[in-house]
Image: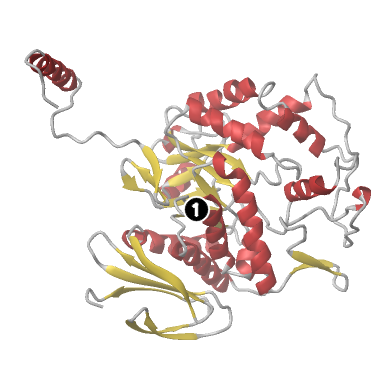
Amino acid sequence: MAVSKIEAPLRLIWMGLLTGILLLYGFKPGDDPEPPEWSVKQGWVYKDGEKFLALGLWGIPGYEAKLSQVDTDSANIARFKQMAELFNLIYCQFGREQSYMAESVLMTGWDFFQWRMVKRFVGDSLYTPDKDGSGHIDYREMRFVKDNIETYYKDYIGNQIVEPVLQRFAPFNFIWFLMDEPNTGFQNWAWHPAIVFKYAQEVRRRSPGKVILLDLFGSLKGDRFNYELIHAKTFSRLPEHLPSGIHPEQLEGDPEKLYTYNYAADGTSLYYFDATSNTWRPRPWPLFREKYYYNVFQTALLYHSSADVFSVNSYPDFFRYPEAAAIVVNAIKDACGQDKPVWLFFDGAAVAKPKHVSVTDYVKNVRCQIYLSMIHGATGVLIWSKKEASWTYFQLLMDVLREIKRYRFVFEGNTESSGILQEKVHFCIKTTDSEQRFLILANSDKSTTYYIRDVNGHPVNKRLEPLDVVVMQLGRNQ
């Protein structure tokens, strides 16, 4: 389109004014705008424009998090700083933040939300719950919160939960650990997706640009939330009184006799009750894998709008079936999109280690779990531990984390191909920024040795013992 003689000078004047304004605020022609502190894309969290391979820690063996007091214990401070050198993300409860944490990126939010929300509806003058006899908060109270989340609780969440966290952690660099296992919620009753979503909305509105992490489950045997969803399809209301424990029998059809309410998403349990030993046992792997996948998929789908990053912790299941760590990543990405970042929690306190298994063998199993998750697209590793955890075990696990940190440039590369070889050997080929190509292999089998000669036309010639992991560079022309 032609520009008139009058329009041309006006355009030059406006361009000059715009240039002057940009120069006034420090922007020079040719400068790239500063990247946001946090962003999420293509399965990764980015910090200051660079991929953030999360190495996170919840709980430090031997470290006491001080509540509402200044920590002057030099040994305690030294233990925290020792961990901060390895981990780039550390969980901190509300009220336990210390000045020496200023160099770390913290995770926070969940404990304060739970405490404030429970305090709110337990003392709620608008609703006096009819207890189920156990003295615990029950599902009816959670339903009341869900039904009133857009009105009665909306401002409360923003003003009394989100704002205090923002004020308290203003001096620190942090992300939101939004919720821990919402599907079991509080006293084993689920935080409904509508409640969690409203919380996430208030976080996004009041602290835009912060990353939100949501830990979906603990044990994946099943949960009360699935029970409620399944029951609602059949019955017009939930029974007035629900049992407080799991019974070996499941009597279907009568809402007053649904004793087994630890349901998977398809209405069954991932575990079955063995009357001979009086214990719950997992189903064989082919059936377990199918139900496990669907359970994670369905739950991630329901909570998908409430977080930027998802996690799961399921230590006994991961130990029993290491391949489950890969299944979790696949299920979350299939439910929420391949660009959804996944950071799984792994056992940092050996709570799922059977007595007959050595510490060394258990660490080998956990190492395999970690690599399996990352082969399938996880971009972070989170370790759950506690003050009382074995320091001997924890140090061995830290060697694994140092290895992951050493291979950071490999994990941050682009995935060229991935898949499964000979049923149990998982692989991916990565291309780094410097055009180097690496192969990562993990044998998820606990008892079988595999001989890998070739991967997608690349000669390999590797022997993988049970639970072995291999990281090797491929030739540039292979």
Q: Nearer the viewer, residue 1 or 437?
A: 1
Residue sitting at x 70%, y 42%: 185
Q: Is residue 52 left or right of residue 118?
A: left
**What is the x, y in percent for residue 190?**
72, 42
| Residue at the image position 84 percent from the left and 48 percent from the top | 234
Question: Looking at the picture, how far across and down is residue 452, in whole percent?
Answer: 42, 84
Residue toward you, 15 or 351: 15
Nearest to the observer: residue 194 or residue 372 = 194
Say if 409 sits above or below 8 in the image. Answer: below
Q: In what quadrant of the picture does the N terminus appear?
A: top left
Can you tell which quarter of the image residue 19 is in?
top left
Residue shown at the point (76%, 61%) measured from the top left: 269
Q: Quadrant of residue 263?
A: bottom right
| Amino acid type shown at disc 1 | Trp
Residue 374 percent coordinates (x, y)? 45, 62
How busy is the neighbourhood of tag 1: few (under 14 within 10 Å), some, or many (20 plus)? many
Q: Is residue 398 left or right of residue 37?
A: right
Is residue 375 visible in the rendered structure shown here? yes
- Quarter holding the C terminus? bottom left
- Which element type, helix, strand or loop, lies under badge 1? strand
Colour setting? secondary structure
Left/right placement of residue 10 relative to residue 125 reads: left
Q: Is residue 391 visible?
A: no
Q: Which residue is mark 1?
A: 343
